[in-house]
Amino acid sequence: MKLASILRSELLKAHSELIKGQLCKLSTPHGPQVGDLNIFSLHNPRERFWAARTRQLHASHVSVGDRLWSNLPYLRPLVTIVADSLKDYGVDEVGGRCHDLLGTR
């Protein structure tokens, strides 16, 4: 299989619609990676994840029990983190660290 086909397949898997109560697992199957996360309300694309407000309400590093909040005028939780396999990651054998910082553009 060509690389372009693999990337297209992975990209299609990444665009999913979830309803309340469903779980979504984020992973890095091909080793250390950097990723962006965009979350929108299924019923209103104007309601979207607001990293800056989430950071104000919780912290720069989110973990189990924290919620990812939507923008104004909605300001409600879009996602609740229910598991975190990297919370105790620390520093690996080559000096790498988990960078889970909420950033904004």
Image (cartoon, rainbow, N blue to C red):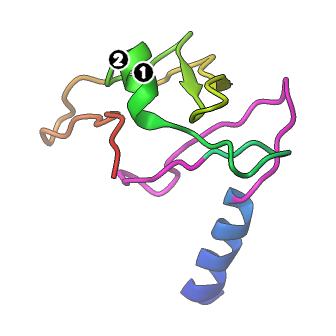
Q: Is residue 27 magenta?
A: yes
Q: Is residue 74 left or right of residue 41?
A: left
Near mark 2 (Cα within 10 A), the count class, few <14, some 14-19 or many ≥20, is some
- Residue with the mark numbered 1: 62
Name the image quarter holding the N terminus. Answer: bottom right
Main SS category, magenta section? loop
In the image, which residues are magenta?
15-38
**Who's the residue at 70% across and 73% down the image?**
9
- Residue with the mark numbered 2: 59
Residue 3 point in image, percent of width and height: 55, 85
The residue closer to the viewer here, 69 or 90, is: 69
Q: Is residue 78 left or right of residue 95?
A: right
Element type at mark 2: loop
Mark 2 in CB contact with mark 1 (< 8 angstroms): yes
Q: Distance from label 2 to label 1 (Cα)?
A: 6 Å
The residue closer to the viewer here, 94 or 81, is: 81
Residue 65 point in image, percent of width and height: 56, 9
Q: Quadrant of residue 78?
A: top right
Looking at the image, how many numbered discs can be counted on the residues? 2
Q: Residue furthest top?
A: 65
**Who's the residue at 47% across and 57% down the image?**
30
